[in-house]
């Protein structure tokens, strides 16, 4: 290391006079070093190295090379060699502390250590588990005191179902909340996007929240179609999370057959139902891409997973979860993109040049318990074993004739009408 320092010193200072002086200082240092090496064969640092991390002293050297200011520091280090052992120890401690602070300013990894507390040693093989259940944010009532009050009454264990609705979906909304009431769920809330929906909910004893009219995004809610409303929901959801609530976001083309809160894992930032229809498509698989012209290397392996359904997911009040909502809302405001595509891309695409990926933890829900309508109509209703299982919810996401199919699902699962699903084709016609 002494050699490396010498080289950089000479480069930094072209003037031979200064160089000479420095060389002289170093010679004295080396000489003194030899003398002290003779007197203290076990070294000054022996005691220190046992108490500080072994990687730190060597990094101290490379940081010291950085600028000419550090040259003086090195000189004083050399002089200090002739002083007491205690003084040296103190210097090493100071340098180590300075280095630690510099490193903290540098990488995200270091920031994580600051956030998460003390650094830990890795445990033995098979015992190491990374953090997937992120800490929840500190609730901030000032964001929306009126909503905070409603949530205090409605939520159970700081969790609730939230659905956005306007008058265009009134028929489905009614079937939706009736299925929720039938199961005995009370922690749910309709975000009414127009007055008629608010009135409709109130007259049916459905917990409802109408946003303040001065919010500029509300015009989307009143006039917008399905996709525009989807964009709005990510902005509205943010407030719920800021208030400290875990939200089970629900479209209204969904039938509740059991209480979903009994089936959540709550270990991830996002826990979502899938558009997949079997183990592979729902949970991920290796898809081999074949390019015969490449000969020996004709097979390229790809990883596939069917997208998460952005119409039914549980999202915990954590920093990565809120960042996800912000990212999706931001993209929907700037690009003409389907909200479900943005939702999945932000969740899954890794960091790469020009892009920093989100680091949110995610979990795919059981596709038989949180069932999409393809699974129901293509597989489950034709399988004597599967059709006896009771899902938690059924989402009519794959079919445009939603209302009649919703009613048929209620008939089939809740009212025991065995042939209720039979009139419908697998897909739309
Ligand atoms: C799908 O996965 C489940 C649970 O991982 C397993 O029990 C089941 O046998 C799998 N089904 C098929 C068809 O592989």
Image (spheres, helix red, strand yellow):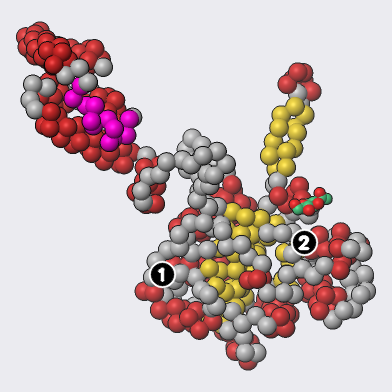
Residue 364 appears at what percent x and percent y? 66, 55
**Badge 2 or badge 1: first in the primary sequence:** 1
In the displayed structure image, the side of residue 356 where residue 388 appears, left or right: right
Residue sitting farthest toward the bottom: 203
| Helix, strand or loop for disc 1 | loop
Residue 301 appears at what percent x and percent y? 71, 32
Quadrant location of the N terminus in the rendered image: top left
Quadrant location of the C terminus in the rendered image: bottom right
Whether residue 119 is situated above or below residue 75 in the rendered picture: below
Whether residue 407 is situated above or below residue 236 in the rendered picture: below
Residue 263 appears at what percent x and percent y? 66, 67
Q: Nearer the viewer, residue 316 or 24?
A: 24
| Helix, strand or loop for disc 2 | loop
Q: Quadrant of residue 309?
A: bottom right
| Residue at the (60%, 78%) spot, across then down | 188
Q: Quadrant of residue 47?
A: top left
Can the viewer see residue 171 in this picture?
no
Would you say the beta carbon of the disc 2 residue lies within 8 angstroms of ligand 1? no
For label 2, the residue is 368
Which portion, as a residue range, is magenta?
43-54
Crowd rating for badge 1 (residues with CA inside 10 Å; few <14, some 14–19, many 20+): some
Can the viewer see residue 366 in this picture?
yes
Q: Nearer the viewer, residue 393 or 214?
A: 393
Residue 243 appears at what percent x and percent y? 44, 71
CA–CA distance in space, label 2 to label 1: 34 Å
Q: Which mark is residue 139?
A: 1
């Amino acid at each position: 290391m002494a050699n490396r320092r010498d080289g950089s010193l000479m480069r930094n200072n072209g003037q031979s006079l200064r160089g000479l002086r420095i060389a002289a200082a170093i010679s004295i240092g080396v000489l003194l070093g030899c003398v002290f090496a003779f007197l203290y064969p076990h070294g000054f640092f022996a005691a220190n190295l046992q108490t500080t991390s072994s990687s730190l002293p060597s990094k101290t050297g490379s940081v010291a090379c950085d600028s000419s200011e550090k040259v003086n520091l090195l000189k004083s280090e050399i002089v200090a060699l002739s002083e007491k052992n205690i003084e040296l120890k103190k210097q090493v401690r100071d340098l180590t502390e300075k280095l630690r602070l510099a490193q903290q300013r540098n990488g995200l990894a270091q920031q994580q250590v600051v956030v998460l507390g003390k650094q830990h040693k890795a445990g033995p093989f098979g015992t190491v588990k990374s953090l997937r259940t992120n800490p929840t944010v500190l609730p901030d009532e000032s964001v929306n005191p009126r909503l905070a009050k409603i949530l205090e009454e409605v939520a159970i264990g700081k969790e609730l179902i939230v659905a956005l609705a306007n008058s265009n979906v009134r028929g489905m909304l009614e079937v939706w909340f009736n299925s929720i009431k039938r199961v005995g769920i009370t922690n749910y809330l309709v975000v009414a996007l127009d007055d008629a929906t608010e009135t409709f909910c109130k007259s049916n004893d459905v917990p409802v929240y109408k946003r303040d009219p001065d919010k500029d995004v509300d015009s989307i809610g009143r006039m917008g179609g399905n996709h525009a409303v989807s964009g709005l929901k990510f902005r509205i959801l943010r407030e719920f999370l800021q208030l400290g609530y875990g939200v089970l976001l629900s479209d209204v083309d969904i039938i509740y057959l059991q209480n979903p809160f009994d089936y959540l894992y709550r270990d991830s930032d996002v826990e979502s139902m899938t558009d997949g229809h079997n183990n592979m498509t729902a949970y991920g698989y290796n898809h081999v891409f074949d390019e015969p012209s490449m000969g020996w290397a004709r097979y390229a392996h790809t990883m596939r997973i069917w997208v998460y359904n952005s119409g039914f997911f549980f999202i915990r009040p954590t920093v990565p979860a809120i960042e996800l909502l912000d990212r999706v809302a931001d993209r929907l405001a700037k690009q003409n993109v389907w909200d479900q595509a943005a939702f999945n891309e932000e969740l899954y695409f890794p960091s790469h040049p020009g892009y920093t990926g989100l680091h949110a933890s995610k979990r795919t829900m059981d596709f038989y318990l949180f069932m999409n309508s393809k699974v129901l109509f293509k597989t489950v209703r034709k399988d004597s074993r599967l059709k006896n299982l009771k899902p938690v919810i059924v989402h009519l996401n794959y079919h445009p004739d939603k209302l009649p199919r919703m009613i048929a699902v209620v008939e089939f699962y809740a009212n025991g009408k065995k042939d209720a699903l039979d009139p419908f084709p697998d897909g739309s016609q």
